[in-house]
Amino acid sequence: MGDLANLQSGNLSLGGTNFFASCMLPFMIKAFSKNCPKIQLRITESDSADLYARLLTDEIDLIVDSGLYNVNFYESIPLMEDHILLAVPINNRQNRNHHAARLTQKDIIAGTVNDENIPAVALADFAGEDFLLLGRGNDMYRRSLGLCRNSGFSPKVRLYLNQLMTAYHMARQGLGITFLTDSLVRKSMLSDALVYYKIKDPATTRKIFIAYRKNVYQTSAMQEFVRLSRNLYNK
């Protein structure tokens, strides 16, 4: 019955991991709130496993994610793609060997990462370096190990971390190299402490989507949030 109010009242519960909650949801919420100011929003920030569990019990209506999910219980709507890059402290000795492939944060903001004339690097060249990886249960943990495995080595991990933004700041301090996404790099504060490299592996492309519980009734608020978010990222 509340849904018959045609977005003049109601609630919408959204979820995301730290990266999506801090770097993507604010833009989506701003667009939604402008169109639907009377809908009360609630945001949950947690790890992917917890977010999907809350979807299943209707504690959350929609989550933004990029990982694997059980297709028997959940469905998704694509938003955009981002790309995994290797982030290396500026004073790392390997940078001397890959001058032509180096990208700065300003290059990534400008879209140079899509320039086919910028070569990718062989990840195996960095096999001896200290890595900063996200911990088990995180989508980037699985992806990072997969990239290293595809390059024929197991990474020497100096630190396991909980959040992608933490890995970014640790790498900026020169504590190791890490995997970051171009989406995060574009939205981070300007810094020349890191250089970035494209990696020769199709697995570096990941899809970002809005997920919801399968066969759930989609309220007008849910549908409008999805519509506005897709329009936002299509632009």
Image: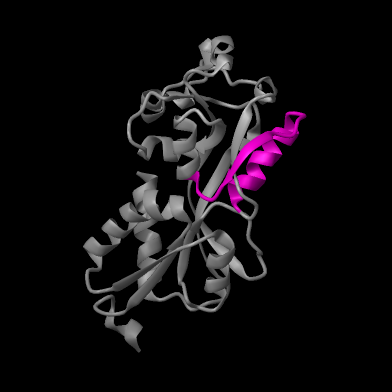
Q: Residue at x 58, y 16 (%)?
A: 94
Side (left or right) of 174 relative to 151: left
Visible residue check, residue 24: no
Please determine whether, in this image, residue 90 is positioned above or below residue 144.
above
The x, y position of residue 63, in whole percent, is 47, 63
Q: Residue at x 36, y 25 (%)?
A: 106
The x, y position of residue 13, in whole percent, is 40, 71
| Image quadrant where residue 69 sits | bottom right
Q: Residue furthest right?
A: 152
Q: Nearer the viewer, residue 134 or 4?
A: 134
| Image quadrant where residue 56 sits | bottom right
Q: Which residues are magenta?
A: 138-164
Q: How many marks?
A: 0
Side (left or right) of 137 relative to 65: right
Q: Residue at x 32, y 54 (%)?
A: 26
Which of the image's four quarters has the N terminus? bottom left
Visible residue check, residue 176: yes
Q: Residue at x 22, y 61 (%)?
A: 34
The x, y position of residue 208, in whole percent, is 51, 50
The x, y position of residue 10, in whole percent, is 31, 79
